[in-house]
Image (cartoon, rainbow, N blue to C red):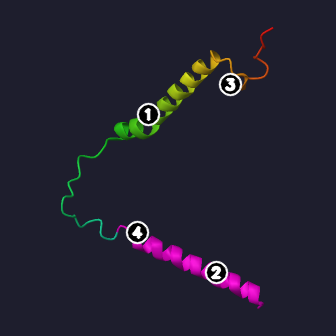
Amino acid sequence: MSNKVNKNAVRAGAISAGTMLMLLMSSPAFALTRDDGDDPGPGLSVINTLGLYVVAPIVLFLVIAGLTMVLARGSDNPRTHAASTHHPRA
């Protein structure tokens, strides 16, 4: 085996070992043990979860995109318009 291949194999092994160590350290092995001050609230229902993590971001995106389009329409900046819809003033 050449020196370069050996160096790459050692590097790949070290990265794999480091990644595995980080995954093992972050595992939820001690999640059943409550810490001091840990007071979880009631869980979210499926409807609440979908509304919070799916519907709300989509609505927020649509509001921001709509405001951007409306405010860009009244601008005189040619960079805010498509080339086919911008008519320069005579």
29 versus 7 height, above or below: above
For the residues bearing labels 4 and 3, Cβ distance under 8 angstroms:
no
Amino acid under disc 2:
Arg
Residue 66 percent across, percent down from the top left: 56, 23
Taking the image as shown, residue 12 lies to the left or right of residue 51, namely: right
Asked which secondary structure carries label 4, the reply is loop
Query: What residue appears at the point 74 percent right and 23 percent down from the top-left corner?
Result: 82
Magenta residue check for 15:
yes
Query: What residue appears at the point 74 percent right and 84 percent down from the top-left corner?
Result: 5
Compute the Cα span from label 1 to label 3: 27 Å
For the residues bearing labels 1 and 3, Cβ distance under 8 angstroms:
no
Q: Earlier in the sequence, mark 4 or mark 2?
A: 2
Toward the top, the furthest residue is 90
8 versus 68 height, above or below: below
Residue on which the image places disc 4: 26
Amino acid under disc 3:
Thr
Give, as a single range, the part of the protein colored magenta.
Answer: 1-28
Q: Earlier in the sequence, mark 2 or mark 3?
A: 2
Which one is in front in this view, the residue at disc 2 or the one at disc 3?
Answer: 3
Asked which secondary structure carries label 3, the reply is helix
Q: Which mark is residue 80?
A: 3
Amino acid under disc 1:
Ala
User: Residue 49, located in which quarter of the rendered image?
Assistant: top left
Amino acid under disc 4:
Ser
Magenta span main SS: helix
The 10 Å Cα crowd at callout 1, few under 14, some 14 to 19, many 20 or more, is: few
Residue on which the image places disc 1: 56
Compute the Cα span from label 4 to label 3: 46 Å
